[in-house]
Image (tube, helix red, strand yellow):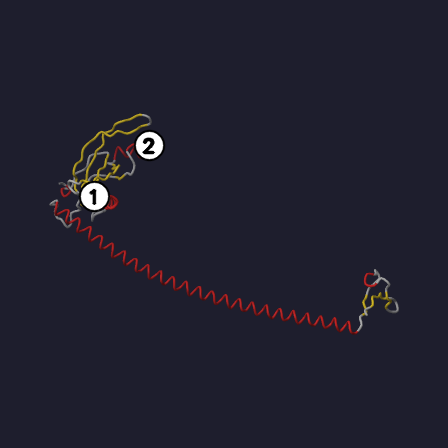
């Protein structure tokens, strides 16, 4: 049985209070107790080593598994990216084909419209003709008052039949009017229009810089579509601040 002692001048002396005695400085173990303690220490070391070996093995497994998962993810992503690339190429080819097809169909529609209206040369003619251009009184609101100004209203007939939807006609007409020719002039400029403005006349007056442009530029505004079912073609009507310039002969009816 172990003894709780304190060290004296000539050796160790057992203390009466045991391990809780304030004077206790050492513990004397029996051989059996010492061997048991050493055995527990050795077992603890072995368990610690085994735990470390197991932990190292799990870490290696996790690293290997992580690398495998990363490789699979990279392979999957690569395959998906290649598939997206193939689909993109196919979509681009299809879009290019459809664009060419649409352009061909639009060209045929324009040529037929030109032929029906006896516009020559039917293959090169834009298909846009001036139906009318007249000076009109335009009423607008200035604060709380209504004012009147003289503007010009022009009607252009397009080569697009009323079989086109409003959305299609609007897009095609505006693209056609703003398309530049070999002289870098669009069809609107050939009519003497300097600028296309999306707002109304009164909106121009709200800003001094815009108002100054009214004195020196022919500004087009308030573009509106009209389906002329008698002529069977879409037309665009718009106001502008000055009279048209010298209208090209090929745009006469």
Closer to the camera, 221 or 233?
Answer: 233
Question: Which residue lies most toward the left here?
Answer: 118
Q: Residues within 10 Å of mark 1 (few under 14, many from 20)?
A: some
Up/down of 12 relative to 210, above or below: below
Q: Residue at x 33, y 60 (%)?
A: 87
Closer to the camera, 224 or 216?
Answer: 224
Residue 146: give x, y in percent of width and height.
Answer: 29, 26
Residue 85: give x, y in percent of width and height.
Answer: 34, 61
Residue 206, disc: 2
Chain-order first, disc 1 or disc 2: 1
Residue 136, disc: none
Whether residue 140 sits left or right of residue 157 in the image: it is right
The quadrant holding residue 215 is top left
The quadrant holding residue 252 is top left
Residue designated by label 1: 187
Up/down of 158 relative to 21, above or below: above
Residue 45: give x, y in percent of width and height.
Answer: 67, 70
Label 1 with label 2: CB-CB less than 8 Å: no
Q: Quadrant of the C terminus?
A: top left
Whether residue 252 sits left or right of residue 32 in the image: it is left
Residue 202: give x, y in percent of width and height.
Answer: 30, 32
Separation (CA) of disc 1 from disc 2: 29 Å
Q: Residue at x 30, y 36 (%)?
A: 199
């Amino acid at each position: 049985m172990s003894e709780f002692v304190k060290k004296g001048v000539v050796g160790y002396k057992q203390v009466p209070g045991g391990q809780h005695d304030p004077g206790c400085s050492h513990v004397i173990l029996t051989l059996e107790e010492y061997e048991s303690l050493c055995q527990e220490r050795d077992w603890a070391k072995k368990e610690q080593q085994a735990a470390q070996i197991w932990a190292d093995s799990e870490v290696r497994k996790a690293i290997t598994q992580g690398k495998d998962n990363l490789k699979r993810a990279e392979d999957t992503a690569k395959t998906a990216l290649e598939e997206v690339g193939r689909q993109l190429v196919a979509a681009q080819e299809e879009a290019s084909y459809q664009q060419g097809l649409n352009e061909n169909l639009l060209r045929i529609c324009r040529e037929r419209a030109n032929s029906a209206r006896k516009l020559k040369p039917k293959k090169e003619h834009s298909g846009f003709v001036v139906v009318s251009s007249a000076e009109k009184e335009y009423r607008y609101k200035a604060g709380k008052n209504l004012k009147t100004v003289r503007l010009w209203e022009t009607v252009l007939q397009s080569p697009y039949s009323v079989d086109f939807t409003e959305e299609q006609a609007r897009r095609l007409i505006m693209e056609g009017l703003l398309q530049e020719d070999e002289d870098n002039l669009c069809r609107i400029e050939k009519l003497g229009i300097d600028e296309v403005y999306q707002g109304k006349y009164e909106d121009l007056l709200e800003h001094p810089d815009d108002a100054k442009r009214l004195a020196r530029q022919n500004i087009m505004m308030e573009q509106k579509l009209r389906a002329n079912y008698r002529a069977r073609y879409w037309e665009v009507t718009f106001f502008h601040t000055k009279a048209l310039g010298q209208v090209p002969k090929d745009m006469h009816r």
